[in-house]
Every structure is written in structure tokens, then in C-alpha cells.
């Protein structure tokens, strides 16, 4: 099976950006990270001093000289300090990891929520879950791992200096083997980055498939495809196992090679030290110290462990960084002309989504105050039109204007105040049902919450809930239609000059839909309505219909005029056997909106 590279796999630039992110997260825990370095340096200093003190102690004991007891106590103190400082390093590493993970998760969630829905949709829910959980935790461990890499090098470097001071020949013998170790660590870091990257990708693919399957659990059960679905979800397991084995093979081979190289170096150093003793250059105590320092210097091979954690953290950071860097919508500072009717214009609007072009050069004008139904076959581009009309996303070409002002020049607060949305499956947030309706750019008053709920046909069922409007949202059992009515109520409570309803009445019964329609005319703040509609009745009741076909405006006009076209009738499932009528892309008669009673 082949896994294509995700949007975050952009080579060096992505790696650099992830490193910048890690530098920022390290700065956020700078105090504790410095603590790791200090404790590690302290532990390294203690471990470096210990062999010298032990060597001197041995020489004093052999010579029966005074002061051996004091030196022994000093050695015990150094050993204790090494243990305590090591424990502090472990504790600080844990807290730095936890803080860094939390910091990364907050940034990633903020980045994801600030981006446009189509950008966010590039990451499947399962993939996002993996990036925010496992990947963020791995990346969060990177700052502490970096400090540990630096710390792991401190003791060996110090030990090497001590060897130079005791007997330069022993230091030279050790240094001769270092280029091999550097080569080994470099190759480990490179191969590890590749294998960890593969593993994380497959892991995300499985999570993504699993989340898809959970989302469609009812359909899977109903269509008796449980076995096939299980196979589909688990199919990448083989690739995961291969990637995992590859990862540990890289790790294991680095460990094995350094496991051979380092004892070999220690043996060579000891041999040189032994020759020094025979030549009278070194004392017995010196030889003891040389053997301990050689072992300490050989600890450089153990740098592979934190280096592995650092490599895994850097690779995981790229996946988290892709969420942090998700392009966010930029807002302007302009306002709308006061009292404007809500005239909506699209000029040469083109939208690309990967290979697809949901909208291809759309020109459209909906005069203020009118209700326009957007109709077309499935995939015609209706939801995409609704998306750019309310600036949930920007078009790739062209511009969208509300009362003559480009939407991307509007201040965010003004945009969200004046443009309202209701969706087919609204997402509600807030502690209670009333809070969910009140939530918006500005919190709606209790009075407008109730009046909006009445207008959306939601008041009656809200009253039957255990605590009415005060029912906690997560204790309110809601059907699809009830959820839609709450979404409509929220939109009505915050209605601005443009209200966009994207299939927002699809689950309502006909009577409630009519009631909502009447309320839209008489009880909700007057303005322009753009309604994505599949039902014939919605198109028939609208002032005008925008008929989309394959991302283009096929025609614009009153429903009864378009009805003469058999292809238009076919959109609603009526027979089509005559040729299409002429195209009309604009609404004749400006001022229609102003003449319309509200
Ligand atoms: N993020 C995306 N990536 C790839 N293609 C996309 C994306 N979003 C939309 N499309 C494609 O663009 C076309 C229009 O999609 P859109 O959702 O606007 O259609 P629609 O008319 O609302 O359809 P429906 O009535 O089925 O909801 C479809 O072919 C769709 O597959």
C-alpha cells in the first residue's frame, strides 16, 4: 500500500518551520529547560570529579597517608549528589514535557479553529486526533530531549578533558575513535527521521480510517459491511508493523554498533594507561581514574537514546506544526454602510479544491432584502457558493461584496455581526440550551433567545425538556430536526443584513418549514437570505432562484419562469426532455428588495 505525503510533508521548509516551533515551545518552558541543563551539568560535574577523588583516595590509602577518610566522605557526597541531581533532571524533564505538550496542543487547536473550513477539512478527524495526542506528546518531549542530548555530552567531554590532564596519550587514544562515533550518530539521526516519519504517517492513516468508520457506524451495521470495514481499517497494520520494525532496527543497529565501538575504545585507553603505569608515567590511582574516565567518555555512545527522542520529537513536531500553521483568514478593518439592504455580489468567483473546481467564474447579484434559493444537482457548487458568500472561505479568484464592500476588507466583528449562518448539522456550544441559542459574535438577550426560538419552531420542544431553556446541552436529547431548529434559532437571534441557510431546513417537517419561512419574512430582522435548497417548495417560495450547474450559474430568475425549462424541472426530479432555456445571470429591476414588505 502506498501512503501519499500529507500537506505537512513539504521538505526542508516544513522541517525548518517545525524547528522554529520547537524553539518557541522551549522558550515557553525556558526556566525549567535551563533547570534540566543545570541539574545535568551538576550531575556530570559530580560524575567527573568522582573518579579523581576515588583515585586520590586509593593512592592515600596505599601510602597510608592522612586525609583518606575525608576524601572517602567527599566521594560519598559526590555519588549522592549525582543520584539526586539525576532524579531532579528526570522530574524536570517530565514537567517540561507535559508543559510543552500542552502548549503545542493549545497552539494547534487555535490554528485549526482559525483556519477556513475547507483548509481544516484537509485534515481528517482521525488524523487531527493523532496529531493532537500522540504527535504532540512526542514533540513536547523534544525540548527536554535536546537538553538531555547536551547534558549527555557534558560528562564525556569533561571526562576527555580529565584524561588530557592525567595522561594526554590516553585522551589521544580515545579521540582516534571519535570520527567513527560521529558517523554512526549522523547516520542514526538521518535514518531515524525517515523511519519515524513513515511510522507516524501510517499511524495517522489508521486513526483516520477508524474515525471514518465510527462516524458511519450505523450505515456500516445496516449494510452488513462490518467485516469489510474492519479489514479496511486494519489494512495498514502490516505497513505499521513494517515501519515500526524499521524504526527499531535503526535504533537497535545504532545501539549495537556503539555497543561494540565504545568498549573497544575503553579497552584501547586502558591499554595505553597500563603502558603509562609500566613506564612510571601513571600511579595506580591514576590508572583507576583513567579507567573510570574512559568509561565516562564512552558514555557519549549513550547520547543515541536522547538523540532518538529528539529525532522522534522533531518529526512529530512537523505534523503538529501543520495544524499550527494552517492558513488563517485575515480580516480587514472596514465597516459596512449603515442601514444597507444587504446586496450580495459575486464577481468572477472561482474556487479550487485540489483538482476540483466547485465554482468556475460565477457572476451573481442578489439585491438587498430578497430571498434567493440556490438550487442545482448534487455537487453543483451550492455549499461552496454559500461558503464564499458569508466568507467562511475566500475565493481563489474574483471577489465577493456585501453592500459594495469586499468581504475580505471587513473587520471580523462586523462580518460576523452582519452575516449569519444556519447549517444542515449545526454545531452547538454553551452550557445550556439557552446559552447555545444566545452564543454568537454578541451574546443574545434571554428575550431574543425566546423570540428566535419561537420563530424557528423550537420553543415548544425546548419547553418540554427537563429544565426547559436551562436544560444542560449535553442532557438535551435532540433529534436531527430539533438540532436544526436550535441552529436556526441561533441564526435568527443574531440575524444581520445577510442570512445564509445551507440546507438548514432539510430535516424539518413541511408544516415547521412553512412556519420558519413565515417567521423569516415577518419576525426576523429584514435582510437578504441566501438559501441552499433541495426542495421544490423552498425554490417556489423564494423571490428568485440561482440555478447552479457544474460550478457555473446556469440561470437566475423567479422559480415560475425557470419552471418552463425541462432541465430546471429535472433538478427537482421532474422529467426533462426538452432543450434548456436561455441563461440569465442577473436580477432585473433593482430596488426589488426595498419594495418588499417585511
Ligand atoms: N474540499 C474539497 N476537496 C475536493 N473537492 C471538493 C471539496 N469541496 C467540494 N468539492 C467538490 O466540489 C463540488 C461542489 O461541492 P459542493 O459541496 O459545493 O456541492 P453542493 O452543490 O453543495 O452538493 P450537495 O447538494 O450534494 O451538498 C463537488 O464535486 C465536490 O466534490
Image (cartoon, helix red, strand yellow):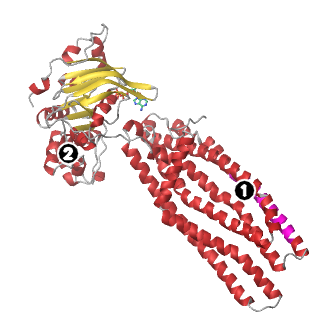
Depth check: give the residue in front, 18 or 573.
Answer: 18
- Which residue is drawn at the image coordinates 86% and 67% (left, top)? 272
The answer to whether residue 234 is seen in the rendering is: yes
Q: Position of residue 35 (x, y in %)?
A: 53, 68
- Side of 94 relative to 460 (left or right): right
Depth check: give the residue in front, 529 or 84.
Answer: 84
Q: Main secondary structure of the magenta part?
A: helix
State the residue lying farthest toward the right: 278
The residue segment tinted magenta is 250-274
| Up-down relation of residue 314 to residue 382 (above or below) | below
Q: Quarter-wise, where is residue 166 in the image? A: bottom right
- Which residue is drawn at the image coordinates 25% and 26% (left, top)? 345
- Find residue 461 and name its label: 2
Q: Position of residue 176 (x, y in %)?
A: 80, 58
- Side of 305 relative to 261 (left or right): left
- Find residue 255 and name its label: 1
Ligand 1 closer than 8 Å to label 2 CB: no
Image quadrant where one finds the C terminus: top left
- Side of 326 relative to 392 (left or right): right
Amino acid at each position: 500500500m502506498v501512503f501519499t505525503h500529507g500537506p505537512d510533508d513539504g521538505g526542508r521548509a516544513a522541517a525548518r518551520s517545525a524547528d522554529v516551533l520547537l524553539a518557541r515551545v522551549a522558550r515557553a518552558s525556558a526556566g525549567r529547560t535551563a533547570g534540566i541543563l543545570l541539574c545535568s551539568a551538576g550531575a556530570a560535574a559530580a560524575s567527573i570529579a568522582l573518579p579523581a577523588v576515588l583515585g586520590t583516595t586509593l593512592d592515600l590509602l596505599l601510602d597510608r597517608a592522612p586525609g583518606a577518610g575525608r576524601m572517602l566522605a567527599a566521594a560519598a557526597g559526590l555519588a549522592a549528589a549525582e543520584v539526586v541531581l539525576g532524579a531532579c533532571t528526570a522530574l524536570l524533564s517530565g514537567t517540561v514535557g507535559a508543559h510543552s505538550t500542552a502548549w503545542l496542543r493549545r497552539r494547534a487547536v487555535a490554528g485549526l479553529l482559525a483556519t477556513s473550513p475547507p483548509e481544516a477539512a484537509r485534515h481528517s478527524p482521525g488524523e487531527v486526533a493523532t496529531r493532537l495526542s500522540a504527535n504532540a506528546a512526542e514533540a513536547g518531549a523534544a525540548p527536554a530531549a535536546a537538553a538531555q542530548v547536551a547534558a549527555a555530552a557534558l560528562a564525556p567531554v569533561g571526562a576527555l578533558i580529565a584524561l588530557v590532564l592525567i595522561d594526554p596519550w590516553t585522551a589521544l587514544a580515545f579521540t582516534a575513535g571519535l570520527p567513527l562515533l560521529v558517523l554512526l550518530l549522523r547516520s542514526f539521526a538521518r535514518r531515524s527521521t525517515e523511519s519515524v516519519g513513515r511510522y507516524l504517517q501510517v499511524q495517522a492513516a489508521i486513526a483516520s480510517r477508524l474515525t471514518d468508520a465510527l462516524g458511519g457506524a450505523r450505515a456500516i451495521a445496516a449494510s452488513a459491511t462490518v467485516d469489510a470495514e474492519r479489514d479496511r481499517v486494519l489494512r495498514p497494520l502490516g505497513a505499521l508493523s513494517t515501519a515500526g520494525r524499521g524504526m527499531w532496527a535503526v535504533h537497535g543497529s545504532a545501539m549495537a554498533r556503539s555497543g561494540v565501538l565504545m568498549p573497544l575504545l575503553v579497552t584501547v585507553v586502558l591499554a595505553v594507561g597500563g603502558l603509562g603505569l609500566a613506564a612510571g608515567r601513571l600511579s595506580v590511582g591514576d590508572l583507576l581514574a583513567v579507567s573510570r574516565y574512559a568509561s565516562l567518555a564512552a558514555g557519549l555512545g549513550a547520547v543515541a537514546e536522547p538523540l532518538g527522542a529528539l529525532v522522534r520529537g522533531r518529526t512529530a513536531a512537523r505534523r503538529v506544526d501543520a495544524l499550527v500553521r494552517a492558513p488563517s483568514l485575515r480580516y480587514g478593518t472596514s465597516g459596512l454602510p449603515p442601514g444597507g439592504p444587504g446586496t450580495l455580489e459575486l464577481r468572477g468567483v472561482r474556487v479550487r479544491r485540489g483538482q476540483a473546481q466547485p465554482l468556475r467564474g460565477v457572476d451573481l447579484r442578489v439585491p438587498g432584502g430578497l430571498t434567493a434559493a440556490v438550487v442545482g444537482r448534487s455537487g453543483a457548487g451550492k455549499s461552496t457558493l454559500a461558503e464564499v458568500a458569508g466568507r467562511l472561505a475566500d475565493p481563489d479568484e474574483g471577489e465577493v461584496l456585501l453592500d459594495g464592500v469586499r468581504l475580505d476588507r471587513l473587520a471580523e466583528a462586523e462580518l460576523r455581526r452582519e452575516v449569519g449562518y444556519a447549517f444542515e448539522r449545526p454545531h452547538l456550544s454553551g452550557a445550556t440550551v439557552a446559552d447555545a441559542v444566545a452564543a454568537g459574535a454578541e451574546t443574545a438577550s434571554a428575550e431574543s433567545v425566546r423570540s428566535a426560538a419561537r420563530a424557528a419552531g423550537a420553543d415548544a420542544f425546548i419547553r418540554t425538556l427537563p429544565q426547559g431553556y436551562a436544560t444542560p446541552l449535553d442532557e438535551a436529547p435532540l433529534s436531527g430536526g430539533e438540532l436544526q431548529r436550535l441552529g436556526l434559532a441561533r441564526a435568527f437571534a443574531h440575524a444581520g443584513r445577510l442570512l445564509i441557510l445551507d440546507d438548514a431546513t432539510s430535516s424539518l417537517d413541511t408544516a415547521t418549514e412553512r412556519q420558519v419561512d413565515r417567521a423569516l419574512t415577518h419576525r426576523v430582522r429584514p435582510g437578504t437570505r441566501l438559501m441552499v435548497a433541495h426542495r421544490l417548495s423552498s425554490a417556489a417560495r423564494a423571490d428568485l432562484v440561482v440555478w447552479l450547474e457544474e460550478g457555473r450559474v446556469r440561470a437566475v430568475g423567479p422559480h415560475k419562469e425557470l419552471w418552463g425549462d425541462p432541465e430546471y424541472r429535472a433538478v427537482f426530479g421532474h422529467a426533462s426532455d426538452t432543450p434548456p432555456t436561455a441563461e440569465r445571470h442577473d436580477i432585473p429591476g433593482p430596488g426589488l428588495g426595498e419594495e418588499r414588505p417585511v
